[in-house]
Image: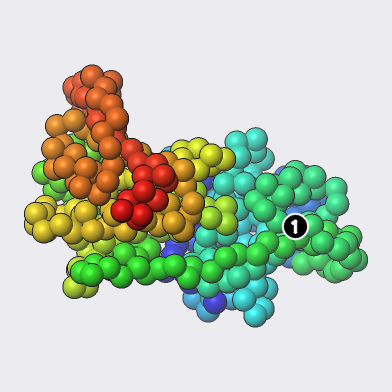
Amino acid sequence: MLDARFLPLRSDRAAVRPMHVDDAGAYAAGTNDAAVRAHAHLPEPEYTEDSVRALIQGSIRDGLERGDLAVLTIADPATDEFAGSLVLFGVVDGSVEVGFWVHPDRRGKGLSGAALVLAIEFARRSGFTELTARTVPENEASQRVLARAGFVRGEQTQEVAPSGERVSLLHYARKIEPLSLFPVDTLRLRLRLHDHADAGPLQRIYGRADAARYLLDDPWTEADAARHLAERVAKTGLDDGSTALALVIEHEDAVIGDVQLWLTDTARGVAEIGWALDPAYGGKGFAGEAVKTVLELAFTTYGLHRVAAQMDARNEASARLAQRVGLQREAHLRQDWWSKGEWTDTLIYGALSSDCHAASNQ
């Protein structure tokens, strides 16, 4: 079933979240657009702010609680304002269908494609192995978005749409690789995907001045933690269309940090890695154990060519860790980054897949 615990989800281009009553006016206005009326085939002949508000407080809320219907808002990631609608429905044996539309004032910004990527991750985190879609042949924009997201076009049929009209529909489907790799257990740690319950423990880590001193962000507030977790929950791997992996570091069931791996050159298998550890657990080798494990995943599971780590040159602890896990120091960039009111130096460490193979043969 659709698991609302994994909402909201966010990227730098879109956010997907449960609908709020404040979305009612924008939703109703969007449904009056000619393109939405022509292509979305919505079940109601007309939507008003009051009728949408009633749906949000009734059937939309109930469907999300049951897990068989998710009528979600596509939101602007910077403002959280309503930008469109994304619906997941028709749950059948590991498969769920998706539909979407974007408010006319928000088109041309890549929101639908970015929201569809988040919908795939929501379905994946909920345990589904297939996402399907249907669209009318005239809706070429929707077909392009689906194709870019990895959907494969199937048959064309005549069916009764939710609007009650009999229309010609193109069928699309996308297989979703299950999350079989995680969690990963090491000698002392468990590395697992993030969920929203991690916001509190990670805020206590990233909210510390000493932990955030050499990071790009200021110490996290609770709002910062919620925003960052909405991004991390969607980072499930470097395969099947995903471009980032974010893992919580646990020791004896306590969250003590996290580590992230993200592609910087998808076509050529180049990525960057970053990590943070609760200072209270420093000096015990936990961060090195976690980072080394993720590097092994990078080269042996995901088949990457290169992984780099960049850090503030004053962060001596991270520099020592990078060297311990086999990253080689490649550059010291002088005053290349303006951070927190001052110019800072950057150290760049890197490892190649050939380094990993050489080490395994020794």
Quadrant in which the N terminus is drawn: bottom right
Q: From the viewer's perspective, tell me whether residue 285 is left or right of residue 82.
A: left
Furthest residue toward front: 362
Above or below for 132 versus 360: below
Looking at numbered disc 1 in the image, what kind of residue is underneath it?
A: Val
User: Which of the 4 quarters of the picture holds residue 340?
Assistant: top left
Tell which of 287 and 23 is nearer to you.
Answer: 287
What x and y, as percent, mark residue 6? Answer: 44, 65
What x and y, as percent, mark residue 65? Answer: 49, 75
Q: From the viewer's perspective, tell me whether residue 182 is left or right of residue 253.
A: right
Q: How crowded is mark 1: few (under 14 residues within 10 Å), some or many (20 or more)?
A: some
Task: Determine which residue is flagged by label 1.
Answer: 152
Tell which of 297 and 29 is nearer to you.
Answer: 297
Residue at 90% x, 66% y is 158
Q: What element carries label 1?
A: strand
Residue at 53% x, 66% y is 124
Residue 201 can be seen, yes or no: no
Residue at 65% x, 35% y is 108
Tell which of 154 and 360 is nearer to you.
Answer: 360
User: Which of the 4 quarters of the picture holds residue 133?
Assistant: bottom right
What x and y, as percent, mark residue 314? Answer: 14, 32
User: Which of the 4 quarters of the picture holds residue 234?
Assistant: bottom left
Above or below for 330 versus 8: above
What x and y, as percent, mark residue 104? Answer: 67, 40
